[in-house]
Each structure stands twice: as structure tokens, then as C-alpha cells.
Amino acid sequence: MGEKFGRHIAIYGKGGIGKSTTTSNISAALAEAGYKVIQIGCDPKSDSTNTLRGNAYLPTVLDSMRSGKKVHLADISAKGYGGVLCIESGGPVPGVGCAGRGINAAVSLLQELKLFAEYKPDYVLYDVLGDVVCGGFAVPIRDGITDRAYVVSSSDFMAVYAANNLFKAISKYAPAGGARLGGIIGNGLSAGYSKMLLDDFTNRTGTKTVEYIPRSLVVSQSELYGKTVIEANPHDKHADIYRRLARYIAQNDDLTIPAPLSVSELRDWAKIWGDRIFDYETGIVAESANI
Amino acid sequence: MTAEIGKTRYGCNLQGALSTLEAVEAVVPIIHGTAGLGIQSFAANKSGNGIVGSINGYSVPSTNMYEKQIVFGGGSRLREQIKNTVRVIEGQLYVVLSGVESEMISDDVVAMTQEITDQGYAAAYYKAPGFRGHARTGYEEVVAVLLDQIAGKAPKQERETKSVNIFGIIPQQDLYWQGNLREIQRIMGSLGVKTNRLFGDGEDWQSWQSVPAAALNVVVSKWGVKAAENLRSTYGTPYVFIENPGLGPDTDNFVEIVGEQLGISKNVVDNFLYSEKKKFDYVIRQFAEYYYSYDFRRKISVIGEESKVIRYGEFLKKYLGMQIKTAVITDYEGDSQEQQPVKSLEKIISDIVYSDDTERIEEKLGPDNEIIFGSELEAGAAARLNAELFVIGNPQNRELAVSGVDIGYAGAIALIEKISRIGRGI
């Protein structure tokens, strides 16, 4: 990749879990703190940076490639809140072509365009599509593109399942120079047991939860305005949570190679929590539950 | 078990399918894949198999996909290629072959083919990603596609009681495919039987229309069995699978079985075989001087496809007194360690190896070999063993094999003529 400019961070998580909201708020918080930030949406939906740009139209990297014309950085990037440079990789229409290869092609094109050398960012955030279903979606954590990844997860089983899949990808690629894990960002946590469930999962996989973001109307409202919480509600406590998270991610160098659970371990673990949740809701406190 | 294969000898699934289609005149293959897919097959065939058909090599239409089509799907690029192909190349049947990349991204080859079918063109598709098989499965499966095109579409015709189709000889992949098909046709012709060669000169899509009319399907390698099974269930056509159609007098068994199946009078069969045997003996007598002067009772190994190894093995042992040290079968399916030895081979040789890995084959050949019957890939082994290499299969680049034959009486005579050079350093 040649000279490295800035710290490159990948943020993964199951679809609809709040990755883009979280990533955009981290970008906004870092920008607010005076850093030069690039946010690259690696999802065919191409809506990662919407709240940084007030939902304005932005041609994707792959749209430009599709047109067959020479691509210029100016055509595929836009400055959003606080000067965050917003880029969307884009992808094919659902059901056609190969979105995984699309991410690979988009990242290669950005490198060819010398994006990082030109812009000299302090931080580059990659907001990557949900589950790591094939090699293409693992590109941002391979080949030295990023050196750290975070995963956004709620306490829903399928979100944890997606996180565990990412752990598998990280543990596969990290020994050969791929990204390591910074931790889990707990998002949309409303139930009383949510924190405990996530903590138990991180304990078992040798990782940690780096922030707990509770469910909040402020987040939904800001999103509807086409803005981040940092921009729309800068004095809300949620803005502070994002600022704290951004500070942590900016400074943290405690990276690990996770130990993912096997399919059967994950299933057994889920069952235990199924029982615990029921006990919790019905007020039964088990000795070992640590509630 | 996974292992690295050193110098594998067969082309990919698409290569087998393409080589097969090219050998049927007026059938137009259309490749949907990245640039170079067709050219690789062309380059491989150019080494000596003969480049056949009017649509071959550089003239095979191809979508030459690039990254844009991989990311966004190559369906519309294929539509464009099909549309232009039917405009500029007049064919009786168009067959779309999709390669690795288009199959990896699951392009809708079916719908694209259907579009020209709806416009009244005869068209079919075969999903031929290289990773799904090799050249031999490519032949097997694309033949099924062609047969499927005939089913219900070929004009109704009376069954011809004395006619056969030949399956199991793979165009442009088997070294002497043209000569061998002609030799079978010659033999059948002598019995008054009409032969549908289906591939090679003068064979076009019209020839395939008469496949259902044949009274018998004759299969001469395991790669033709599925086609024959298919025709038996569709049209009730019986078939015979004779894995060793023979060289020289070994041919008699083949001719007698086919003759009996077709109800040819025993007299006709016997008279034909008698005249063939006489010609063969005439040659053998001429060869005898060479045989004793240069001592042909050599220690040898035979490497190649199952049907070829059986044919050569039996002939070289029985008629030339050669001692077979090792037989290597290269066209097996599944794990090389779990193959059941071919019964007819077990009678003539104890050391049967299954491998298509050139390096492993070389390891298996013992130091006392004097002649290696194999392909050009055995050149290294032959040099190391200080043995002569006698090329009987692909890959090879010593000759343009257009009339060569290694089946039947003609095959035996050609083989003796060639083999007479052995031992004299020429």
C-alpha cells in the first residue's frame, strides 16, 4: 500500500444494527475534535454517509466505474459535517453481479486515485456491510488496508452471530497481517440484560465491549433530520457518548485476535442466555448469574 | 485429501465442451467469460490435435468480460454478444458456454439464451465453469445438452435397423479421434452398417438429427456411457459399451458384439474379420525381421486414459510380447487411492496406478522400463529412466494428428509401422 496516511479503522456489524449511524457519529465527533476524517461506506446500499451530508446525492465509486469514464476523486467524494470526506463504494443492483468483488474493486480504485496521499487524513473509517459472507467483504480487514476493526452489535442473537462471524474472519487474517479487533460497540441496548449478555460474549471470546450505546429517540430524530447526533443535538448525552467512543477509538491501541465460538458453542451459549433472560424477566436470581 | 497436482494433463470443463462443439459443423459456441478462455483451449489444441470446425480459435464469439461486468453482472454483455453473433455467424445451433467468472457471480445465462430461442433461433446453454470438472466431463455434459436439443425437436423418422452412433471418443482431446472415428466407420461399413460419427468432417447439426434413428449406440470409453443411457431412456435405443474396441485381432470381439446386436449374419462378420486378419498377418510377417533384429520384447509402461491403456496394454503384451511393468490410468474420477482396478487389466498386469499428476506418475515408473507409452508429459520420466518415449496421447506436439489411428486393424497396422522405429535411435 506504500506510505500509510492516518489510522484506518473498519466498522462491521449485522445489517440494520446501527453501523452507519455509529460510524457517522464517530466521524463527526473526530471532525469536531479537529481531525481530518474520511468515511468510506462499503455497502451496496450506499447510505453510510447520509447523515454527514444531509442526505444529499453522492455518486458512488462503482457508479463512476460503471460509466466507463475516467474517475476523479472530486466526482466521487463530498465534504460533509466538519469537513469529513464522504465516499460510498456502491455496488450492483440486488441479485446481480458480485458485491464482494465490488468492494474489492472500489478499494483498489481509491488506492489508484491516491486518495490518502492526496487528502492526508488522520482517520479513515470503513463502514462495512453486515455479515462477512465472502472474501470480498473481508477486503477492508485484509491486505493491510485497515489495522483495526470494531463490530457494532446489539444483544440480539443474530447480531452476536454476525459479530462472531467477523471474529472468525479476523482470527483467520490477523496472523498474516490483517486487522485486529478493537472491540464490540454495544448499540441500541434497551433490555436490562443487554450489557451482561454482551459482556459474557466478549469474556468468552477474549474481547471487550468498548462502549454501551442505549436506545434513544434523539438518535432516531437526528437521523430523520439527515444529521448526526453530534450536529443535530450536540448537547444531548448521546452526543457525549459518541464523543467518548470516538476518543477511545482514536487512542486505543489495545487490539486483540478474538477467539470465535464454534457453531455449537454459540448455540449452547444462546440457550443458556435464553433461560437466564426468562429468569431475569420473572425475577428469579440465579446464584451464578451475577445480576 | 488435498494435494497439489504437478502438471495435470487435462484441460478444463469448458475446454472439453468447446472442443466438442467445434467438431460439429454449424454449431456455434458462444463463450461467456473473461478474455483468453477460448484462446487457451485453442493454444492447447494447436499443439497437435488438429484445429477443427469453421468456428474455432480466434473466431469463437466471446463476451471477454472485465471487472465492470463481474461487479454489476454480465447478463447484458452476454445478451449483446448473442445478438451480434446470430447476426454475423449463420449457425444451425448456438450454444452458450459460461466460464468460471460468470458462474461465480451467477449470471442469468438461462434467460439470456431463452431470449434468442424466443426469437426463433435454435439455442442452448451449458454452464461450464472450469472448476466443475475437466475436459472429459465437459464432453460428457455438453453431449447431453446437444441430445436434449434433439429430444422432441428432431423430425420424426423411422429407425434404421443397420445404423449406429458412436460415443466416447472425445474430439480434439483424444489424440487420434478423427482417425479412430473413421476406422469404426470403415469397420461398420464393411458389415453394411451406417455410422453416425457425429464429429469431424462432414458432420454437422443435421447429422445429430438422425441420432434417434440409429438402431444401436456404440460406446467405446466410459465417457460415452451417459449419452447412451440418455438415448436408451428417451428413445429406447439399446447400447453396447465395449471399453476395448481393440487393436488388431482384439477388434474381433468388438465387431462380433456389434454385429450380433444388429443382427448381421455371422458369415458377413466372419468373412470381414478373416480378410482383416489376413492383412494384419501380412504386415506382421514383414515386421518379424525387425522384431527379432531389434528385440521388441521390451519392458514397458503404459500411461493414458483407461480405454487406451487397456487397448494398448493387451495388444503390446499379446502380439508384441512386451512386458508391462506399470499401467497408469489418468482419467479416473474421485480419489486416486479408492479406485477399483479394471478387471481386464488385472489379467495382464499387477501394477495399476491411478494418477493424473505427472510428478507422481514419474515416481511410480521403475528403473527397468525401456519404453514409456504415454504423452509428452512423460518425456522427463523417459529421459531419467533412459527409456524411449512413444507418444500415444495428449498433450503432444510431434505431429498434426489428422489421419492417425490407434483402434481396430488399421490402428494395429499403423502402430506396428510406427513402433518399428524403436530401438534404432531414429
Image (spheres, helix red, strand yellow):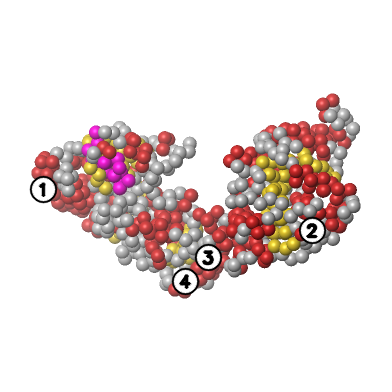
Labels 3 and 4 in the same subunit: yes
Q: Which of the two discs, 2 and 3, sits closer to the camera?
A: 2
Q: Secondary structure at mark 4?
A: helix
Q: Does B375 appear in magenta?
A: yes
The numbered dot on residue B286 is 1
Identify the subunit bearing mark 1: B
Query: Mark 1 against mark 2, which lies toward the viewer?
Result: 2
Q: Which mark is residue B237?
A: none
Residue A222, x across and y down, in percent: 85, 57
Q: Position of residue A144 (x, y in %)?
A: 61, 47
Task: Identify the residue position indicated by label 4 in the image.
Answer: B86
Q: Is residue A221 left or right of residue B244?
A: right
Q: Dots 3 and 1: beta carbons under 8 Å?
A: no
Q: Quadrant of residue A285?
A: top right
Compare residues B299 and B204 and report the one nearer the observer: B299
According to the picture, the residue beneath numbered tag 3 turns out to be B78
**Residue B277 among magenta residues:** no
For disc 2, the marked residue is A82
Choose the circle earlier in sequence order: 4 or 1. Answer: 4
**Which residues make up the magenta segment?**
B368-383
Regarding mark 1 in the picture, which secondary structure is present there? helix
Mark 1, Cα crowd under 10 Å, few <14 / some 14-19 / many 20+, is: few
Q: Chain of mark 3?
A: B
Q: Are marks 3 and 1 on the same chain?
A: yes
* Most distant residue in the top direction: A287
